[in-house]
Image (spheres, rainbow, N blue to C red):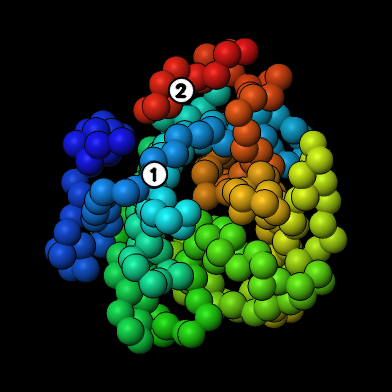
């Protein structure tokens, strides 16, 4: 794929947004700057989200993901309600050699913004703007050796270390949480492997290390393809909020070429082409 085409697709996906460069560190409401170069693979795919408790279809994720040498380096996700209404967008950039992503989550219904605007050798800069607030709140937290940010950071942290997790092994990590303008320690545990269509499924549970998990138990579960490292399924709290209640969904999100039977009859288009046939 040509560099020109990649830039064109990025421009279409982020139409209407301001993409910041060096100024992003001083203006946390701007999006991270994603520099797309040659030899970058662009992947487009769907995520199908259902409410975990009821199984009701909640929203569709449209992913545009950039990879170099098999490693996820950035991209964007756009979220759509079942009726096609856009719910929001998340733009992601993993600086070279970093586990902590710069990202900007911008929800339309209800309006909400959060993310990571800057990472320095000793600090991580978070921001959040909730409904009714005139400006984003900003904070600086300490950076730790084993650290990432948000669900997107957890996914990549685990995916790049699949081979290093022995069965039932546990590892602790600091997780920067823009929604809380803080960071907490979590533990990642490799569960018993499963199988799907003859492929090995590598499963992980992520939960708080503190006793807060007994009061606010929101563990996250990630299922990866053992051969490719691709995410097959996520279960846990979502960054997307119910447009009616304003509360975060708890979801099961599946990824694959074939839409589930309860997915909308007309899916949002992928930048790479039309939705898969039903």
Where does the image place residue 49, in percent across and percent down from the top left?
Answer: 62, 36
- 246 displayed left or right of 91: right
**Spatial CA span between label 1 and label 2:** 22 Å
Task: Give the residue pinned by disc 2.
Answer: 268
Relative to 87, is 131 above or below? Answer: below
> Which residue is nearer to you in this view: 158 or 205?
158
- 233 displayed left or right of 33: right
> Which residue is nearer to you in this view: 229 or 231?
229
Q: Please name the residue shown 70% across and 29% down the image.
A: 56
Q: Are marks 1 and 2 in contact (CB under 8 Å)?
A: no
- 2 displayed left or right of 206: left
Quadrant of residue 184 in the image?
A: bottom right
Work out which quarter of the rendered image holds the C terminus and state it: top right
Work out which quarter of the rendered image holds the N terminus and state it: top left
User: Circle 2 — which element?
Assistant: loop
Give the mark nearer the N terminus: 1 vs 2.
Answer: 1
Where does the image place residue 31, in percent across and percent down from the top left?
Answer: 26, 53
Answer whether residue 277 is visible to the viewer in this image: yes
Where does the image place residue 12, in percent across and percent down from the top left?
Answer: 26, 31
Relative to 69, is 81 above or below? Answer: above
Where does the image place residue 175, in percent across and percent down from the top left?
Answer: 53, 72
Q: Is disc 2 surrounded by few (<14), some (14 to 19) or many (20+) residues within 10 Å?
A: many
Q: Is disc 1 surrounded by few (<14), some (14 to 19) or many (20+) residues within 10 Å?
A: some
Quadrant of residue 265 in the image?
A: top right
- 43 displayed left or right of 193: left
Number of the label disc, if any, that sits on residue 41: 1
Q: Please name the residue shown 39% across and 44% down the image.
A: 41
User: Circle 1 — which element?
Assistant: strand
Relative to 124, is 64 above or below? Answer: above
Answer whether residue 83 is visible to the viewer in this image: no
Q: Please name the residue shown 57% across and 13% down the image.
A: 277
């Amino acid at each position: 794929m040509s560099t020109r085409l990649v830039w064109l697709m990025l421009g279409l996906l982020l139409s209407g947004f301001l993409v910041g460069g060096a100024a992003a560190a001083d203006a946390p409401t701007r999006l991270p700057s994603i520099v797309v170069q040659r030899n970058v693979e662009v992947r487009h795919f769907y995520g199908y989200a259902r409410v975990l408790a009821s199984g009701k279809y909640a929203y569709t994720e449209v992913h545009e993901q950039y990879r170099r040498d098999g490693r996820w380096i950035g991209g964007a996700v756009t979220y759509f309600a079942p009726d096609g209404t856009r719910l929001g967008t998340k733009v992601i950039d993993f600086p070279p050699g970093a586990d902590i992503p710069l990202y900007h989550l911008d929800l339309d219904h209800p309006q909400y913004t959060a993310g990571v605007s800057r990472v320095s050798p000793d600090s991580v800069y978070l921001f959040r703007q909730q409904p009714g607030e005139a400006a984003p709140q900003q904070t600086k937290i300490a950076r730790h050796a084993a650290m990432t940010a948000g669900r997107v950071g957890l996914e990549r942290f685990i995916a790049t270390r699949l081979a290093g997790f022995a069965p039932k092994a546990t590892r602790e990590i600091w997780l920067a949480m823009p929604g809380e303008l803080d960071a907490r320690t979590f533990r990642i545990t490799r569960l018993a492997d499963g199988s799907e269509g003859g492929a090995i499924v590598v499963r992980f549970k992520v939960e708080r290390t503190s006793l807060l998990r007994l009061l606010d138990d929101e563990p996250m579960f990630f299922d990866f393809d053992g051969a490719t490292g691709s995410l097959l399924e996520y279960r846990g709290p979502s960054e997307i909020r119910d447009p009616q209640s304003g509360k975060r969904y708890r979801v099961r999100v599946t990824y694959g070429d074939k839409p589930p039977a309860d997915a909308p009859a007309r899916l949002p288009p992928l930048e790479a082409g039309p939705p898969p046939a039903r």
